[in-house]
Amino acid sequence: MADDAKTWTTPEGDASRHLPLDEILSRLEALPLPPRERGTVVALFARPGRSERRELEQAELTAAGGMPGDRWSRKDAPKPDQMLATMNIGVARTIANGQPIGLFGDNLYVDLDLSEANLPIGTRVRAGGAVLEVTPEPHNGCLKFKGRFGGDALRLVSRKENRHENLRGVYFKVVEDGPVKAGDPLEVLR
């Protein structure tokens, strides 16, 4: 873990930043299409406690522990299918509407198409020196998500007709240990 990493407590969210559904949809449609084969790791976060975030410059991802310093590995029975929560950076920034992306509580923010069509369950990607695999665990919004980003944002990521887009993101598990840092390439292994 980088010595210069900062740990902060997540605020509840700024209701004045919550966007109505039509505005979120309009902004998402205006985004450039994310890459499908070769993307980028934009940001890494560990979640030491329930409301804490630690932004990292780099980390050594492992199949045994996931993201170093993350509370996932300290659970009594950590579920491998929930090891690394991952979200597309364009979607995150759109929904956050100026709030810090760490509010989402994901480990990785990436510039890559996370849709089911591009990354079906079992797809592997190389992130820096690590190899990750998309798990079958659905990555859904929750009441904390609603409180931080609004009811319309939660409806958007939860709607059945949008689930295939994985707007809330996907879960990865680590299948090959390795280092990863912000700015590293993210390559879909077909």
Image (spheres, rainbow, N blue to C red):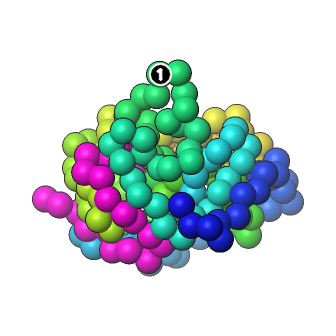
Where residue 91 appears, as percent x and y from the top left, is 54, 63
Would you name the residue on which mark 1 appears? 77
For the residue pair 36 and 185, the one nearer the viewer reads as 185
Judge whether residue 178 is colored magenta: yes
Which image quarter: residue 128? bottom left
Visible in this render: residue 113?
A: no
- Range drawn in magenta: 165-190
In the picture, the quarter occupied by the N terminus is bottom right
Q: Going by the picture, which residue comes out furthest to the top?
A: 76
Residue under the point 36% across and 39% down: 64
Residue at the image position 64 percent from the left and 45 percent from the top:
48
The residue depicted at 63 percent of the width and 51 percent of the height is 104
In the displayed structure, would residue 160 be above or below residue 56? above
Viewport quadrant of the C terminus: bottom left
59 vs 81, left or right, is right
Q: Position of residue 149 (x, y in %)?
A: 72, 51
Residue extending farthest left: 190
Q: Is residue 149 magenta?
A: no
Q: Position of residue 140 (x, y in %)?
A: 52, 38
